[in-house]
Image (spheres, rainbow, N blue to C red):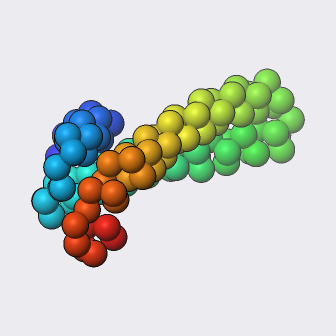
Amino acid sequence: QAERYDEMSEHMENVGKLGNELSVEERNLLSVAYKNAVGSRRAAWRITTSVEQKERSKGNDENAKYAKEYCGRVEVELKKICDAILGLLDKNLISGASNGESKV
């Protein structure tokens, strides 16, 4: 409810690195944390690119430049989050999963 998904994803990453197989509840928390952390940035990226296009069509190149710069920041954050979860899956979770459900 507090929508602090960045912190939640950090904590769940730490749980995933412990080496134990995640329970169903832990897998759900990991999924929710990363899904929402990525989702909020995807929404920010869509809005920012829309603003950039609007400003460019109005001839406000300076504002379009600012929007493009911010969009780049959001893209860097997205890449960092995606690399983190993919690394966690590859190095810790999939290799340590004992049954098919855990590997999905």
Q: Position of residue 15 (x, y in %)?
A: 20, 41
Q: Relative to the observer, which residue lies in front, 56 or 68?
A: 68
Residue 79 is left or right of residue 102, and the answer is: right
Above or below residue 27? Residue 8 is above
Residue 58 is left or right of residue 39, and the answer is: right
Residue 92 is left or right of residue 51, and the answer is: left
Residue 45 shows in the view: yes
- Rendered residue at 72%/40% (across/down): 52
- Rendered residue at 44%/45% (across/down): 87
Q: Position of residue 46 (x, y in %)?
A: 59, 50
Above or below residue 86? Residue 103 is below
Residue 48's image quarter? top right
Q: Which quadrant holds the C terminus? A: bottom left
- Rendered residue at 26%/51% (across/down): 30
Residue 41 shows in the view: no
Q: Relative to the observer, which residue lies in front, 85 or 5?
A: 85
- Rendered residue at 58%/34% (across/down): 76
Above or below residue 85? Residue 14 is above
Q: Position of residue 36 (x, y in %)?
A: 35, 50
Residue 25's image quarter? bottom left
Q: Relative to the observer, which residue lies in front, 60 or 20?
A: 20
Name the residue furthest bottom: 100
Q: Position of residue 4 (x, y in %)?
A: 26, 37
Residue 74 is left or right of residue 29, and the answer is: right
Count of residue discs? 0
Name the residue furthest right: 59
